Image (cartoon, helix red, strand yellow):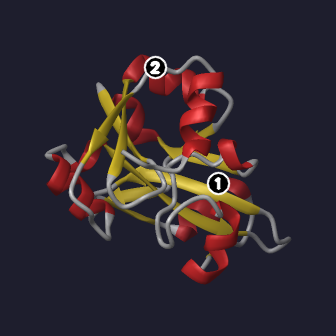
Amino acid sequence: MSHPVRLSDYLDKNGVNYQTIAHPASMSSTASAVSAKVPLHQLAKAIVLEDHQGKKLVAILPADYKISLLWLNECFKATFRLLSEEEVSPLFNDCEFGAVPANGDAYYINSVYEDSLTRESDIYLEAGDHKTLFHLSRTEFAKLTDRNHYSHFARQA
């Protein structure tokens, strides 16, 4: 199985235990969850944003949620915009086009996590390709995200 190694290296270096889950190729987080047979609310997808000062942020939320830029802007006192796939691709140059791993820290980009992810017993992270997920327990997910900001910035679709 071949997937980008930057995120797996980051998990390994930080002592985060995970399992690799292969699934048929898919082009969306929803399709990934369905093909891997994992609940949508446990699959963490990433959305890359840029604020009014040009600073990047990776917002990580469940696959069945929609981001609210209004809520996120209020939380950070900023004005974020969604980046296009063409703008995102160079930031994650080891990943397949359109596949953003659900962790910005491995790429030196700040991350914010939707609060609802903390209630899940298992979390599945998109790995940076269109056919691999990383499965983490709640404890391991907390270890991964302990330096990041949590907020309520999305709602279930």
- At 19% from the left edge and 48% from the top edge, which residue is drawn? 36
Residue at (53%, 44%) from the top-left corner?
113
Q: For marks 1 and 2, give the CA distance.
A: 31 Å
In the image, is residue 56 above or below residue 15? below
**Amino acid bearing label 2:** Asn
Residue 80 visible at all: no
**Above-or-below relation of 97 to 63:** below
Q: Identify the image quadrant of residue 52.
A: bottom right
Q: Amino acid at mark 1?
A: Cys
Residue 9 position in % (x across, y down) = 61, 33
Q: Tell me which label, 1 or 2, sits earlier in the chain.
A: 2
Label 2, residues with CA under 10 Å away: few <14, some 14-19, many ≥20: some
Q: Residues within 10 Å of mark 1 (few under 14, many from 20)?
A: few
Does residue 44 appear to the left or right of 47 in the view shown?
A: left
Q: Quadrant of the N terminus?
A: top left
Return the x and y of residue 152 as percentages of the image width and height. 49, 48
**Residue 75 numbered tag:** 1
Give the numbered dot on residue 54.
none
Give the quadrant of the C terminus: bottom left
Mark 2 lies on a secondary structure that is loop
Please provide percent x and percent y for residue 151: 55, 44
The reply to whether callout 1 and callout 2 are in contact (CB within 8 Å) is no
Observer-side mark, 1 or 2, equals: 2
Q: Is residue 86 left or right of residue 116?
A: right
Residue 106 percent coordinates (x, y): 67, 42
Identify the residue under disc 2. Answer: 17
Residue 36 seen anywhere in this rendered image of the structure: yes
6 vs 53, nearest the viewer: 6
Asked which secondary structure carries label 1, the reply is helix
Residue at the limit of the structure toward the front, as seen here: 1
Looking at the image, which residue is at 30% across and 29% down?
122
Q: Is residue 60 above or below residue 27?
A: above
